[in-house]
């Protein structure tokens, strides 16, 4: 019976290993990989949520900024990370179109990333230089119809949300405008304020100060609802163009294969954090609208968004720089 002590020792070792493997999640810090540099709205929303999430999860939340390539550097990193619940991606609406815009991606957003939840929405606004002889979307469309190709709309670059929204408007209103792509939103906004281009479609949070100071005028909010940052500006649906709908957003994703209970827990904790009055107030001050969803709701939304904008990208043959 000499084998009995050895058998007992082995049983104890296996039990200990099983217990260690099954320890509750999270048992160490959780990393949030942000697709954008520090200081931007996506980064700011993430950092506002991090303290509440850290308290709820009982572990530190580490914000890891990995900007570049339209968000693809961060997305690629997370897609190839361990699916153990310790690495998440904070992305933007760009993730829905990156597969159609970029050739030769080393990851597939739909296959390699699991949707967790939306974080916040950012309404966009169609703005114009004050000299433009149009005070509404209807008047701008009439002007574009009367002068095909005369209006120039700027964007932060080929394939960006502002570019795609402008192309959508062209199709919905059956107008001809010239796209002027810049290397970033700041130089585009500078040229718009200087009158070198006529219109842009950008975040309401960025547009509102310029509109209030009289440097730009707001014509419409692409979508069915008005923007809290500019409540006096009618929606595109109110103006008679319900198909002109574009929205910026932040969202949370995990590597594909991450256990579903972890995804569900993270989604629920984000929703709880967004319900906290102080957190909600500070996010709204950024011009954002807290927009938590269940993983299932967000998966459907992301699929619909990718299908809608992907078709536009493919139909027009748009490729990112």
Image (cartoon, rainbow, N blue to C red):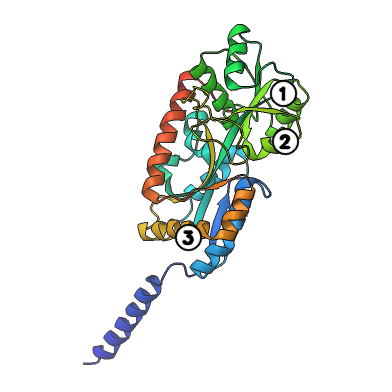
Residue to which mark 2 is pinned: 212
Seen as rendered, the residue at the extreme front is 232
* Crowd rating for badge 2 (residues with CA inside 10 Å; few <14, some 14–19, many 20+): few
Q: Can you identify the residue that label 1 sits on?
A: 129
Q: Are marks 3 and 1 in contact (CB under 8 Å)?
A: no
Give how far across and how far down residue 112 sits, in percent.
42, 45
Count of residue discs: 3
Distance CA(mark 1)–CA(mark 2): 13 Å
Q: Which numbered disc flags the more N-terminal residue, 2 or 3?
A: 2
Q: Position of residue 283 (x, y in %)?
A: 60, 51
Q: Which residue is mark 3?
A: 272
**Of residues 103 and 75, the one drawn nearer to the viewer in this rendering:** 75
Residue extending farthest to the left is 1
* Residue at the image point whose x is 69% and y is 30% from the top: 183
Tell me the SS state at disc 1.
loop
Identified at 53% across, 21% down, the residue is 169
Going from the N terminus, do you reach mark 3 or mark 1 first?
Answer: 1
């Amino acid at each position: 019976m000499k084998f009995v002590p050895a058998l007992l020792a082995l049983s104890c070792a296996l039990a200990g290993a099983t217990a260690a493997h099954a320890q509750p999640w999270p048992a160490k810090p959780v990393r949030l990989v942000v697709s954008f540099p520090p200081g931007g709205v996506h980064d700011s929303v993430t950092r506002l949520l991090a303290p509440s999430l850290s308290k709820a999860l009982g572990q530190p939340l580490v914000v890891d900024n990995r900007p570049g390539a339209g968000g693809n550097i961060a997305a690629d990193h997370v897609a190839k990370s361990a699916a153990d619940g310790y690495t998440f991606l904070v992305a933007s609406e760009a993730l829905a179109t990156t597969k159609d815009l970029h050739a030769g991606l080393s990851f597939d957003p739909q296959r390699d990333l699991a949707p967790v939840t939306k974080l916040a929405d950012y309404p966009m606004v169609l703005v114009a230089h004050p000299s433009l002889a149009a005070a509404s979307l209807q008047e701008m469309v009439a002007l574009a119809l009367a002068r095909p190709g005369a209006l120039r709309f700027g964007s932060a670059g080929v394939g960006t949300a502002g570019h795609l929204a402008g192309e959508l408007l062209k199709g919905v209103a059956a107008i001809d405008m010239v796209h002027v792509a810049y290397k970033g939103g700041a130089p585009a906004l500078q040229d718009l304020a200087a009158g070198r281009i006529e219109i842009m479609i950008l975040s309401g949070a960025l547009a509102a100060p310029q509109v209030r100071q009289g440097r730009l005028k707001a014509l419409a909010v692409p979508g069915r609802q008005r923007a809290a940052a500019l409540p006096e500006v009618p929606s595109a649906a109110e103006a008679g163009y319900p198909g002109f709908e574009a929205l910026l957003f932040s969202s949370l994703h995990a590597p594909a294969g991450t256990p579903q209970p972890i995804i569900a827990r993270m989604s629920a904790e984000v929703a709880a954090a967004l319900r906290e009055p102080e957190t909600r107030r500070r996010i709204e001050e950024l011009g954002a609208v807290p927009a938590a969803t269940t993983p299932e709701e967000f998966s459907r939304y992301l699929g619909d968004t990718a299908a809608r904008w992907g078709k536009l990208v493919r139909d027009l043959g748009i490729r990112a720089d």
